[in-house]
Amino acid sequence: IAAPRAVKCGCLEPFFTARILAARTEELRNLAIRKYLDAGCVAAWAMTSLLFSTAVFTTYSLTGHQLSPTVVFTSMALFNTLIGPLNSLPWVVNGLVEAAVSLRRLELYLATPQGNFDREAVRPEGPFAVDIRDATFTWQPSNNSPGDSTAALKDITLQVRRGALVAVCGGNGSGGSSLLAAVLGEMRLQGGSCALAGTAAFAAQHPWL
């Protein structure tokens, strides 16, 4: 929990406890299913050689052939040679599935278009280091309408003079971090204007490398 003080002040312990316990129960159920499947796979792997040999020799006998030591020992040697590749086949399939999923995720990430946030990068003239006028910002692509319900910040006007020290105060979820992201050009501009007088340095609340 990132904000225990808010949870304590709001007496929200029972609510979050119930949610955590429900998530934990679902997690344990999924882990139990996975372990049962793992146990079944291990049992099948251990019995593969015996079942394979039994099935082959039974089929060979039922089709009217005569089992002889030469046939049996030669077949057993061949089966022992094939056990390794057969045991590796499930891991190969699993690796191929994971690789396909990873490739799809990478393709989706790399194919994501670069954001074009329509922010004026530099406005060197004028007395303001940050100049935001009647701006509306959103995190998600939308229809570029200022009245769109996806807008996170609406009708924002902020003008910070050069050399000024400004503190933005507000509670959790009031939009302070979104305002900084908008100044940095990380949010999409739906309406109005947003410009800086030059470059900007950002020191986040949590360190990031």
Image: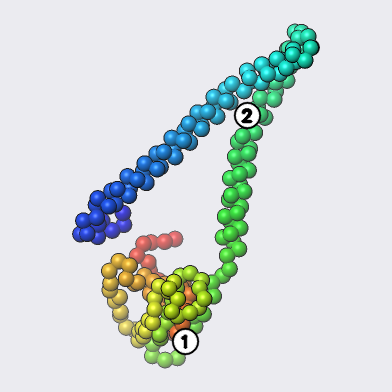
Residue drawn 39% across the image and 78% down it: 154
Q: Which residue is mark 2?
A: 87
What is the C-alpha distance between the residues marked 2 and 1?
66 Å
Horizontal relation, residue 181 to residue 9: left or right: right
For label 1, the crowd category at 10 Å Cα-Cα, with few meaning under 14, some 14 to 19 and many 20 or more, is: some
133 above or below 102? below
Horizontal relation, residue 39 to residue 58: left or right: left
The answer to whether residue 72 shows anywhere in this view is yes
Say which amino acid is labelled 1: Arg
Q: Quadrant of the C terminus?
A: bottom left
Front position in the image: 97 or 12: 12
Dot 2 falls on a residue whose secondary structure is helix
Q: Residue 74, how many percent across, how many down?
A: 75, 15
Residue drawn 74% across the image and 12% down it: 61
For discs 2 and 1, the disc positioned in front in the rendered view: 2
5 above or below 186? above
Q: Residue 168, how many percent across, how many down?
A: 30, 75
Horizontal relation, residue 26 to residue 55: left or right: left
Front position in the image: 129 or 12: 12
Q: Which residue is mark 1?
A: 123
Farthest-out residue, bottom: 126
Q: Residue 158, how many percent across, how many down?
A: 36, 83
Q: Quadrant of the N terminus?
A: bottom left
Q: Residue 25, how many percent across, how many down?
A: 36, 41
Dot 1 falls on a residue whose secondary structure is loop
Say which amino acid is labelled 2: Asn
Mark 2 or 1, nearer chain start = 2
Whether label 2 touches label 1, CB < 8 Å? no
Classify residue 129 by image quadrant: bottom left
201 above or below 33? below
Count of numbered circles on the image: 2
The answer to whether residue 117 shows anywhere in this view is no
